Image (cartoon, coloured by chain):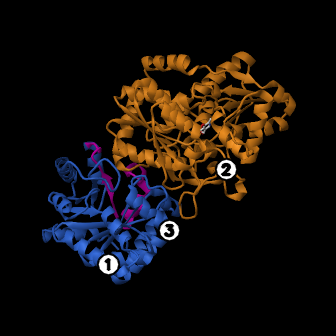
Chain colours: A blue, B orange
Amino acid sequence: MTSRIPNIFNKNKSKNKKTFISYLVCGDPTKDITLSAMHTMSKYGVDIIELGIPFTDPIADGPTIQKSIDRSLKNNTSLHDVISVVKEFRKENNDTAVVLMGYMNPVHKMGVAKFAKKINDTGIDGVLIVDSPPEESVILNKYLTKYKKSHIYLASPTTTDQRMKNISKMSSGYVYYVTIKGITGSQLSNVNSIRKNVNKIKKYSNNNLPVAVGFGIKDSSSAQKMAAFSDGIIIGSSIVELIHKYSNNEKKMNSKLSTYISSISNVI
Amino acid sequence: MKRKINLKNYPSKSGHFDAFGGVYVSETLIHPLRELFSAYKKYATSASFKKTLNSQLKDYVGRPTPIYYAESLSKELGSSHIYLKREDLNHTGAHKINNALGQALLAKKMGKTRIIAETGAGQHGVATATACARLNLKCVVYMGEEDINRQSVNVYRMKLLGAEVVSVNSGTKTLKDALNEALRDWVTNVDDTHYIIGSVAGPHPYPMIVRDFQSVIGYEARNQFKKEYKCLPDYLVACVGGGSNAIGLFHPFLNDKVKIVGVEAGGSGIKSGKHAAPLSAGSPGVLHGNRTYIMEDENGQIKNTHSISAGLDYPGVGPEHSWLKDLKRVEYTAVTDDEALDAFFTLTQKEGIIPALETAHALAYAFQLAKKLKNKKILLNLSGRGDKDIDTIAKLKNIKL
Ligand SMILES: Cc1ncc(COP(=O)(O)O)c(C=O)c1O
């Protein structure tokens, strides 16, 4: 099935709403909690879920997500498990898009062709491999294109104009603009330069590809600020932290999560 | 291996050694890596840079290092001859300074004011701290908590030299996690910071830059050997952690008729699974910015490594070694902790040279080779001295220092 992502952005746009993207690590603390959190997030306004594939060496992540990954790996959560969680999720949800996000090695180990086929069979909508820029993603890109899935790439404050052009050409679904030089969980800074770069990517993109911004968005005020000039916002560390804090009480976790998600969804 | 390798073509423009190497990093690091590549091409190949580096390698580091014929030990082992390229005699006690100094000079040219490094055994950390003290650069060294405990002398040396040593307690608390943390620092501080990677690992252009700076070992050795013995050695042997001392010796000999062997850390034995020998018992995967042989489980998670030697305790290896393995140009093997320890004592007692535990792995294999072969000349890279390992050895012998 074709990626849900383009339609989601289009639909939100027609309603003058921005797309809400959330990130969480699959399997922290258990697959059941992850599934439960995914349903809650979709119900209260998340449009796209970036589901993190745990990896032992997450070089782009800060302490919050590192620890979450460690907890997930204690249960040996594998890429197979991540895919099986989406399979469960799809039994009840056919609207929210799911993007698998992670590092190259687990995908490499499974084999790119097999991975892409499973993505397709499971109703996953897109893939973002943090440590595999376009130059190293040719084969993965070929398969994802074949299955009409979204292949999301990062752009960052250090990305040159020429590269931004290339990245917006290579990406599908959306471009993930990383707001800061740094790792996940860092502080947001310099809104003006973020806006400038987001506009640049939009200008370079010949197919009106949406640009979503992430890293450093923690609350409704930062979400609103970033949503003002982008097509969508991505929240990771704060959600990971919240799930962890209440994970021994599923009901409470879902209630806190719903409040938090609504508070963001309402202002973007 | 039949076809002659056109070494000039590797790594390719995209940083690949055929199926290995590359640039597997998040987008933020792409530009700094390209800047580094350009700066390297611009400065490091210029005559004036080479002149400065060479004069410092001579007067500050103490190059050229000699080749020493271990005559009495060779005689004891049989009819073959063991020659030691004495990188342990370098300032700071290991080959690591060749690269640290080269990269620190490059960083200075690039206008960087802050240097970061990862270290396992502490030798690269000490070398980097030394180069930074010498060139007035701020220095931060990431080191796994476990390594800090087993290499305490080097930790203190780094601090004396003015470096900040940051203890890394994520993951396995060893070299690979120190590397992760250094990459995270770099991505956050790219504007003023240069990352001096300590081995031929990491994303392109690091495997190339470090190889080039370390190749001084092989070029020197090749000339020295030809001059002194009117021939080339029959065998080259070096230990392989990330693989920098090995590639430094090997690279200038790749087109020669010389057998080459890299020795990995076999830990408690390959069969036990407790080792650090990705080339001997791993599979190709992606770690720390490049595709190379790694130690991974069936789900692609990086496995814990085990070695008595902190400097070899790493689940990956430089991509060029993976390439040379698949080309069958270099043979890779492993020796156990115990074999390395035996070799450590043998060299110390027979030749009066205390080797690093990393180096002891190469020695153990060279001794086996010398016993087996008749009349062969074996050139071994004595990559470092063992002072840093005295604590570990004493503890094993239940001796309190
Ligand atoms: C003396 C010595 N030899 C070898 C190594 C292993 O590194 P490489 O394989 O990059 O030479 C180290 C690393 O710390 C070392 O200190």
Chain of the residue on which disc 2 is drawn: B
Q: Amino acid type of disc 3? A: Ser
- Left or right, B83 with respect to A176, comes to right
Cβ of mark 3 under 8 A from ligand 1:
no
Residue identified by numbered label 2: B280
Q: Find the magenta span and give its range.
A: A132-160
x and y percent of residue B19 in the render? Answer: 53, 48
Which of the chains bears the disc numbered 1? Answer: A
- Within the magenta stretch, is there residue A137? yes
Which amino acid type is shown beneath numbered disc 2? Ser
Measure the C-alpha gap from mark 2 to mark 3: 25 Å
- Label placed on residue A78: 3
**Quarter of image, res B45:** top left
Vertical arrangement, residue A8 with respect to residue B60, above or below: below
Residue count near mark 3 (Cα–Cα under 10 Å), binned few <14, some 14–19, many ≥20: many
Mark 2 or mark 3, whichever is nearer to me: 3
Q: Give the residue drawn at x 79%, y 32%.
A: B349
> Are discs 1 and 2 both within one chain?
no
Front residue of B344/B54: it is B344
In this figure, which residue is indicated by the disc labeled 1?
A254
Residue B23 visible to the viewer:
no
Asked if residue B203 lies in the magenta stretch, the reply is no
Pointers 1 and 2 in contact (CB under 8 A)?
Answer: no
User: The disc numbered 3 marks a residue on which chain?
Assistant: A
Mark 1 surroundings: few (<14), some (14-19) or many (≥20) residues within 10 A: many
Q: Quadrant of the N terminus of chain B?
A: top right
Distance from mark 1 CB to nearest ligand 1 atom below 8 Å: no
On the same chain, marks 2 and 3? The answer is no
